Each structure stands twice: as C-alpha cells, then as structure tokens.
Amino acid sequence: MVEKQSRFQVFLKRKDIEFSARRYGIDALGAMAQGLFASLLVGTILSTLGEQLGITFLVQAGGWAKAATGPAMAVAIGHALHCPPLVLFSLAAVGGAANELGGAGGPLAVLAAAVAAAELGKAVSKETKVDILVTPCVTVLAGTGLAVLCAPAVGAAASAVGGAIMWATELQPFYMGVLVSVIVGVALTLPISSAAICAALGLTGLAGGAAVAGCCAQMVGFAVMSFRENRWGGLVAQGLGTSMLQMGNIVKNPCIWLPPTLASAVTGPAATCLFGLQMNGAAVASGMGTCGLVGQIGVYTGWLADVAAGTRAAVTPFDWLGLACVCFVLPAVLTLLFAWPMRRAGWIRPGDLKLEL
C-alpha cells in the first residue's frame, strides 16, 4: 500500500500535478482574473472608447475580445498550472463551454472545469503513442463534460450569492458598505484575486461600488502612506499597479495594514450611503480598484450603459465628485490620518513600508 502511494506521488510530481490551496486558490484564480481582464474588461474598454469616439473598428475589436472571454480564462488557468501545449490549447474549448453554460457565474464555472480538465490532460500527456489525439480528446471531453454537468449549478450558486450580497447592500447600505469594502480590499492586497472573486459573484451595483472603494483604499492608501520611503516610483507602482507589493512588509509588521483597511471601512459606506456610487460595468472591474484606472473606467462604462438604458438621466458633476472622493481623495487623506498616530506611537517605523523597486 505504501509502495503504491509512493509510486502515485512520484507520478504526480513527474506530471507537475499539485493538489494545494495555493496552486488552485492563488495561482489558478489569479490567472483566471488576468484572462478575464485581457478579454472581457479590455473588450469593454475598447467598445466604450469606440462608441464615444465614433470609431467602428474599436467597437468591433472590443466585441471580438469579449467573445473570447471563456477561452481566455481557461488558457490563462492552464498556463498557471504549467500545462503542456496540447493541454493548454485544448482548454480553449473547455473555457468557451463552461462560460456559456455558467451564465452570470461563468468565471467560477470556468475555474472548476478548466482546473479539472487541465490536471486530467496533464496526467495522460505523452503517455501514449497517439498523444496528439488522446491528450486533446481527454482534455476537451473531461472539461466540457464537467461543464455540462456542473456549470449551470455552479453558475446559479455563484449568481445567487452575488445577488444576495447586492440585495443586502441595497437593504443595509451602511453595514454592507463597510463589510464589502473591507473584505474585497483585503483580498486585493492578499495574494489572491479580488477581481476574480468579484467576477465570479457578479458583484455590481452598490455592492460593486463598495468593492471599488475598498480596493482603492488599499492601493491609494499604501501608495501615499509609503511615499516617504518609495517616492514617485512606489506611488505609481502601488497606486496604479497593486498594493500586493506590500505583502512582504505586512508579514514583517501587520500594523502597516491597519490605516488603509480602516480607510476602506469609511470609504465603503461613503460610496453606498453618501454618493450612491454604483459599479454597473463588467463585474471584474469591481475588484480592480485604481489598477490601470480599471475600476473607474468600469464605473464610467456603467454610467453610460445606464444612460443608454434610460435608468439614468445623465452623468452629473455630483457623480464625478463622488468618484473622485471615493477613489482618490478619501483613501489618501484617511490613510494618512490613521497612520499618523501609529507612527507617533512607534507601531509603524521608518522603513517598514520600503519596497525594492
């Protein structure tokens, strides 16, 4: 029995198959978010620009990018799982099927189907003399079969959870504004994907606005709080890149995480109660914050969609004021205010936020 287990472990190691929370919950999930960004989100941005500028090609290019959402996510997941070429390319069909069958919860369905198909494909890869047939067939049939069986249920469950969060935020905008903002903001700084979580749950509306607020609080907060250590390079890297860069410093001194997290507890309800900020663009943008200004572009495209649908009369100066305050002004000011007494007390010391850029 021990010998069989040992042989099985050797086989898994040879195939680079690792059953771990890190491999699936961090590597695969993060890659899925990148695939979603490179297809759905970029497509939405291009389409919006094309419509606003009257450039037909941009609208068409955006439509093609959005049509590749499922395959892009699946291939990105396969790349993160170190799939050989035949498995990687076969995952495109798996992603297309799972995303279509999963409906609003398509990203989560793609994650489940692509992970299973990728690992099965890796297991049979180069094990037969007709590998060029066996490996793609196993990958495609396993992935699409799982998609047919599970994707509708997974999609419905994810959609139900996301719907419940959005309903609760409409019902209790203050408390849910705090909760959603803090949780999604913390997820953005952790080595997991807040964008993928928001996309999987279809988080839009007021809840999406709170999520944007939380992400911006972390990114802008860390950027301004660490300016004395990291100067302009750090400001850009964290403010327009990701606050995840601070994870190494957070492990050394968790106190540095408190100011931007406390700021997110304020900006969340400010977004939901004071400004009524809604993110009705692509759900993935809810978890992007100021990364490439994707969160703000998502809010803007949502405004345009609402105007086109007749649910919003126009984009007002108050809307722009709310977006600026929630995404930039409040995160910067509040984080500095919360950090000041902590620096005075010695909880945050000089150099604690230093990045090697």
Image (cartoon, rainbow, N blue to C red):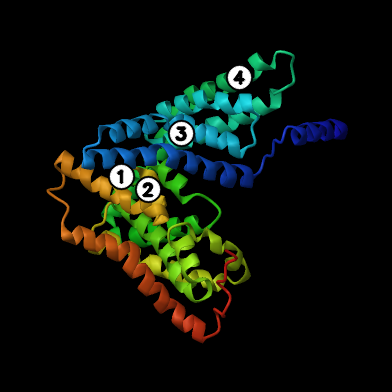
Residue 285's tag is 2
Q: Would you say the residues marked 2 and 1 are in contact, meaning their CB atoms lie under 8 Å apart?
A: yes
Residue on which the image places disc 4? 136
Residue 281's tag is 1
Q: How many marks?
A: 4
Q: Would you say the residues marked 2 and 4 are in contact, meaning their CB atoms lie under 8 Å apart?
A: no
**Residue 245: horizontal and vertical position, in percent?**
55, 61
Q: Earlier in the sequence, mark 2 or mark 3?
A: 3
Tell me the CA gap for discs 4 and 1: 35 Å
For badge 4, the amino acid type reads Pro
Tell me the CA gap for discs 3 and 1: 22 Å
For badge 1, the amino acid type reads Gly
Q: Earlier in the sequence, mark 4 or mark 1?
A: 4
**Residue 8: horizontal and vertical position, in percent?**
79, 31
For badge 2, the amino acid type reads Ala
Q: Would you say the residues marked 4 and 1 are in contact, meaning their CB atoms lie under 8 Å apart?
A: no
Report whether 254 appears left or right of 109.
Answer: right
Quarter of the image for the C terminus: give it: bottom right
Quarter of the image for the N terminus: give it: top right
Residue on which the image places disc 3? 154
Q: Would you say the residues marked 3 and 1 are in contact, meaning their CB atoms lie under 8 Å apart?
A: no
Tell me the CA gap for discs 2 and 4: 33 Å
Mark 1: which secondary structure? Answer: loop
